[in-house]
Amino acid sequence: MTWLVSSTFAAMTRAAIYIRTDAEDRLPSAGEQREELRAYAEERGYEIVAEYSDLRAPGRMLYHRPGLKEAIDNIKWEEDWEVLLVARPECISETESSLHEFVHKFSLYGNRVESPARSWEELLSAMKRYRRQMAGRQGRD
């Protein structure tokens, strides 16, 4: 009997977690988000290699949050991971335009954002729809 053993193993997708809480307690606690995202990563076979957080941070100013800036810098310069996990899209931004800007930036770098609430495909599709709508409005102005 001959046994064939593969010498290659499928690499796990490297993921980072981003946690944002807000002063108004509209978002889940940091612990709740972390637990949810770790379970989500485990279900998908993702290896969590980094965690970023902005606790009690406002939801509008993306680039004024040190944790989020560090995550963006990582996709630009370090490339330590492929997917950023967030508990819900509102953890990135409470404004549609900022969320779509963020998704667009990730798509340009070949990374993605995933959430138990919305898949990458849903976020990407919504961003493309939004960009088409904005392009149509600019054409009318």
Image: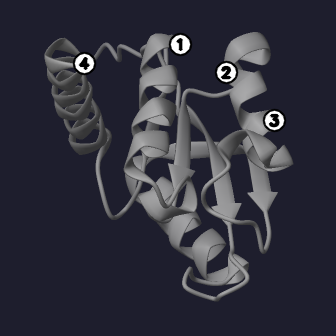
Position of 13 relative to 2 (above/below): below
Q: Does the residue at mark 1 contact the one at mark 2 (Cβ under 8 Å)?
A: yes
Give the CA separation, mark 3 to mark 1: 15 Å
Which residue does the numbered mark 1 point to in the structure image? 109
Q: Secondary structure at mark 1?
A: loop
Q: Does the residue at mark 4 contact the one at mark 3 (Cβ under 8 Å)?
A: no
Which residue does the numbered mark 2 point to in the structure image? 75
Residue placed at 25% from the left, 27% from the top? Answer: 134
Q: Does residue 10 appear in the picture of this structure? A: no
Sequence order check, earlier mark of 2 and 3: 3
Position of 16 relative to 37 (above/below): above
- Please identify the residue farthest to the right as the structure is shown: 66
Quadrant the N terminus occupies: top left
Q: How is the image coloured?
A: one colour
Q: Nearer the viewer, mark 1 or mark 4?
A: 4
Looking at numbered disc 2 in the image, what kind of residue is underneath it?
A: Ile
Residue placed most toward the observer, 23 or 49 = 23
Which residue does the numbered mark 4 point to in the structure image? 138
Give the CA separation, mark 1 to mark 4: 26 Å
Residue placed at 23% from the left, 34% from the top? Answer: 130
Q: Does the residue at mark 1 contact the one at mark 4 (Cβ under 8 Å)?
A: no
